Image: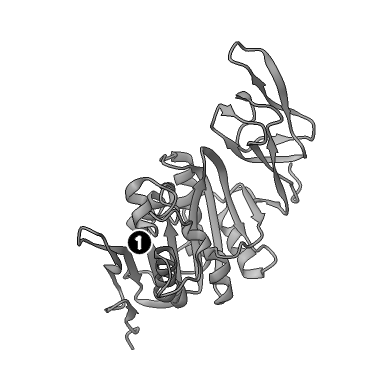
Amino acid sequence: MARESFAIGSVRIRAGSTRNLELPITRLVTGSDVSLPVRVVHGREDGPTVWLSAAIHGDEVVGVEVIRQVLAGLDPKSFRGTLVAVPVVNVLGFMAGDRYLPDRRDLNRSFPGSARGSLASRIAHLFMTEVVAKCDVGLDLHTGSDRRSNLPQVRADLDDALTLELAQAFGAPVMLHAGIRDGSLRHAAREQGAKVLLYEAGECLRFDAWAIDAGVIGVRRVLAALEMTEPVNEPAPPPSIESRASGWVRARRTGILHLDATLGQHVTEGERLGALHDSFGKTLRLVHANRTGIVIGRTEQPLVNSGDALVHVADVTTPVD
C-alpha cells in the first residue's frame, strides 16, 4: 500500500517525491507578496517527520548553506519519513541582512505567535501551524550574534532521553544543557511535544566553512540516527563534551581588545585569555578566565566597553582525555 501524501499549505506532496512551495506571509507596500520558502522531501517509506530551519535571525546565514547541502544529498525514493526544510524563516530580515524584522522585533521571542498579531507574531504562528505541528523533531540552525563567533555546539534539553540521544548523534564538539526562553521556537515546539536541537556555530553574515561542515555532517548523523537515511559514511566523531552551565568573561575596562583565547580551547580559572590596551599599546587590563571549561564563543569586535561580553566559557561535565 502506497504511503499517504503529505499536506502543507494548500498542496499535497506524494510519497517518494520532493516539492518546493511558498507559504504566504504578507504583502509589501509595493504590492509584492512575501512568502516563506519551503522544500518538502516526502519519503517513499514511513518514518519520522523532521523540520530543518535557519535564519530565524535574518543575518545568521550559516544554516541556510547547511540546509542547501543536506538537501542536495537526499533522494526521496530511498528516504524514510518526511523532511520539511525552511532555510530562511525571517525572510524580510534576511533580505536586509538584519537580525530582526522591520518592526525591530526578534522573531525568536515571538513564538507561538498569533494569526492576528504583529508581523513577527504572524510569521511565528504560520511556522508553528504549518511546520512544527506536523513534525516530531526539529533542528534549528543559528550562529553567533553581535560580532561574536561560536564553536559548533548543540543546545538542548539533555534531561530528555531522546533529545540527549539525538544531541550525541549530532556529534558537535560541545552539547550544552540550555534553559528555555519564553517566546523562543524551542520553547513553543517543546510545548507541542516536539524534540528540538538548536545548533550554534560561526559568525553572522559569514559562510564559515568549518561551521557549515560541522552542521552538515551533524544533521546527516541525526537523520541517520532516526533511521531516515542510511548511516553516514564518515568516521565517528569524538564524544561530545557535555556542559550544564556556561558564562561570559566580561571586560573590566574600556579599550582595544587583543584576544588570545580560541574557540574550543580548554582553559582553567584565572588563566590569561587576552588583554585590553589603549591606542598606543599601553596595557589597561588583562582578561582572565572566570571558570574552568571550554571556550564556546568569543567576540570578534576589537573595540570594547566596560561590561562587554568577551569570551563564553562552558563548564565541562564530561571528563576530557
x, y percent for residue 306: 66, 32
- 113 versus 143 height, above or below: below
Q: Residue furthest top?
A: 280
Residue for point 30% across, 74% down: 16
- 319 versus 26 height, above or below: above
Q: Name the quadrant containing residue 206.
A: top left
Residue for point 40% across, 74% down: 116
Q: Name the quadrant containing residue 39.
A: bottom left
Q: Nearer the viewer, residue 25 or 320?
A: 25
Element marked by disc 1: loop
Residue 81 in view: no
Q: Quadrant of the C terminus?
A: top right
x, y percent for residue 101: 40, 55
Residue 166 in view: yes
* Crowd around label 1: few <14 · some 14–19 · many ≥20 (10 Å): some
Residue for point 60% across, 59% down: 167
- 273 versus 82 height, above or below: above
* Residue pointed to by mark 1: 74
Q: Nearer the viewer, residue 119 or 93?
A: 119
Q: Nearer the viewer, residue 10 or 209?
A: 10
Q: Residue furthest left?
A: 31
Q: Name the quadrant containing residue 312.
A: top right
Residue for point 36% across, 73% down: 43
- Left or right side of 84 for 288: right
Amino acid tagged 1? Leu
